[in-house]
Amino acid sequence: MAIPDYKAEKEKCILFLKSYRSEEEPRNSKYMFMLQHISNRRRQTLDISLTDLEEFCVKEEKFRDFVSDVQSNARRYISLFAEAADDVMPESTFAASEEDSFDVLMRQREQAEALNTHQQGDTAQLLPDILRRRFRVYFKPGVKCEMRSIRTIRAADVGHLVTFKGICTRVGDVKPLIEVACFACDGCGFEIYQEVLGETFNPIGKCPSGFCTNRVVPNGQLFLETRASKFIKYQEVRVQELSEDVPIGHIPRSLTVQVKGDLTRSLGPGDIVNITGIFLPKPFTGFKAMQAGLVANTYIEAMAVTQCKTRYSDFSVSPDVLSKLQQLRHEPDIYGSLAQSIAPEIFGHTDIKKALLLLLCGGVKRSLTDGIKIRGDIHICLMGDPGVAKSQLLKHIVTVAPRGVYTTGRGSSGVGLTASVQRDTVTGEMILEGGALVLADNGICCIDEFDKMDESDRTAIHEVMEQQTVSIAKAGITTTLNARTAVLAAANPAYGRYNVYATPQENINLPAALLSRFDLMWLILDTASSEADIALAHHVLHVHREGKPPGLAYSPIILEELRAYIAHARTFDPNVPIELSNYIASAYAEMRQVEIDAGEKAMGYTTARTLLSILRLSEALARLRWADQVGFE
């Protein structure tokens, strides 16, 4: 294998930056325009798209293997592109209003460098190129980039640019990472710069200036000047492979991702993301190195991060999609059409699907002037016989919601649902790691087999369902975490199947404190009916045979349009008009009276929370109509 000529490779980088023109703007050089913005301090990143690189290499014969070289030796080519950008950087056309601290330090350094070069001849004080740069180079994945799972990234990929998909399980704090260390001598005032390439470095011990070297007395001491050193933002993220990528009988694998610069704070716990980065080894240091021997750990240096699911708050609806949604809104039974589009493969359950649609829309969160907050999220419990597709509905809601977490009652502890205390691998400090309810913040948490949970673990959900916070006092850490999540629970009756000869309270077998927190309680019974059973069997057989639901009387709305409709509906904040106040108050009082009259046969527990549930459900219905007020029909 021939040794690559990196001077020639740098010339290729310069040619690409100067010559490449996109099809959208064939007159202007895309990357020279980007460098002009960097020079004018309007941009801090130079994003090299591999798609642009592939398009450019097709036209140039000598660039035939350039893209594969970049992908297989990405760390070296980042420095080559940075050096090429330094060489072709245009002059600034923007006059800065005032100098920042970086400008003052750079001016002083350049003056000291010029003085040192002319008078003493020392070369150790020369400024490294990385100290002068105000930008970082990132490689963005191409269209043809192969999406891989964490399990398929192996030792042969060390140094390569890889793209994979995973879920963030732990996100560390953003800390400063030193890139260039500046040392000052207390004897002669000489400054020396040391570039830091890894996580650890050996500081320079002796002053290399001519003044200290020629002295008879011992040399002056070097002290680290933090003000004159260069730091960047650094964050460590733990990414775990998705459950569908895990083979049978294996446990999920995880990778450490190092995020630097402007990419920090772009990831959150529970986010499903596509990450493009460089797969690199990291040898153990200190006492761990003696135990590990020749074995090294691995990590990913992130180049690009893309969210797989767009949050409702970040959802932008295009004008074409909005016009199509406007047509949908004027259909006669839009409520039923949207509900039937939720899991069309599941037969029946029309009313339950309507309730799940309201769960996705949610009510309006109220923040009062005295600091009290009234939740807008809707909680639903599906209580029913085995085999009525409760778990399938929960799984489908997780896929529809932009942020959803699925867990089971037996496989979850109170700590796993709320938060646990872990030791940080970088600093060794005790940190909090969020559980399922914290990971589902601003989303939906689906808990299956809710009745199988231990009572001590189930009480951990009480605070989350009403106050929507998780209060922690463990290992010297006292704090409150946000858990603004809607809970969708599925459970079986106390006897496995619903016993018609027992009272509803005996069948449900859940404490009143927990039942009152659910806005809707669905009881799904598996009753034998000849016509319904035949229709269900035909539906299931067609799904097994064709892999899709049979021809329906309506055309289900595709998942992307359903998400867009709900996202736009959630932008409305409807309120209850004064005219409906008396009607709602009388309806609530009547519900209370009916429950008193029913006695032991009462199906639930009507409290003041029930009134708030009525308001939340009515606001969700108004949101579905894209209305600013709750209506009466």
Image: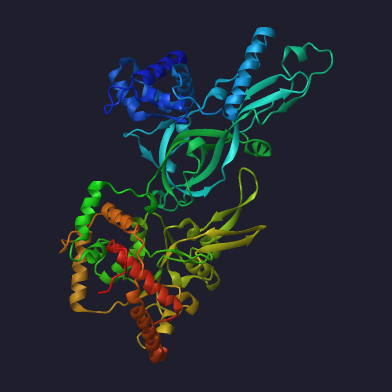
Side (left or right) of 347 relative to 607? left
Where 329 sits versus 497, above or below?
Answer: above
Q: Nearer the viewer, residue 492 or 589?
A: 589
Q: Quadrant of residue 190?
A: top right
The foreground one among 125 and 75 is 125
Q: Between residues 626 and 597, which one lies in front from this camera angle?
A: 626
- Across and down, in percent, residue 90 comes to 43, 19
Q: Position of residue 455 (x, y in %)?
A: 53, 73
Residue 543 in the figure: left or right of residue 106: left
Say above or below: 357 vs 127: below
In this view, 275 is above or below 542 = above
Question: Where residue 591 sits in the image (x, y, percent)?
Answer: 37, 84
- Say whether residue 371 is visible: yes
Please identify the quadrant where the N terminus is shown. Answer: top left
- Left-right relation of 322 to 162: left
Question: Which residue sits at x=66%, y=12%?
Answer: 115
Q: Quadrant of residue 33?
A: top left
Q: How many marks?
A: 0
Q: Indicate the position of residue 521 as horizontal and vertical percent values.
A: 38, 75
Residue beneath the point at 59% across and 40% down: 175
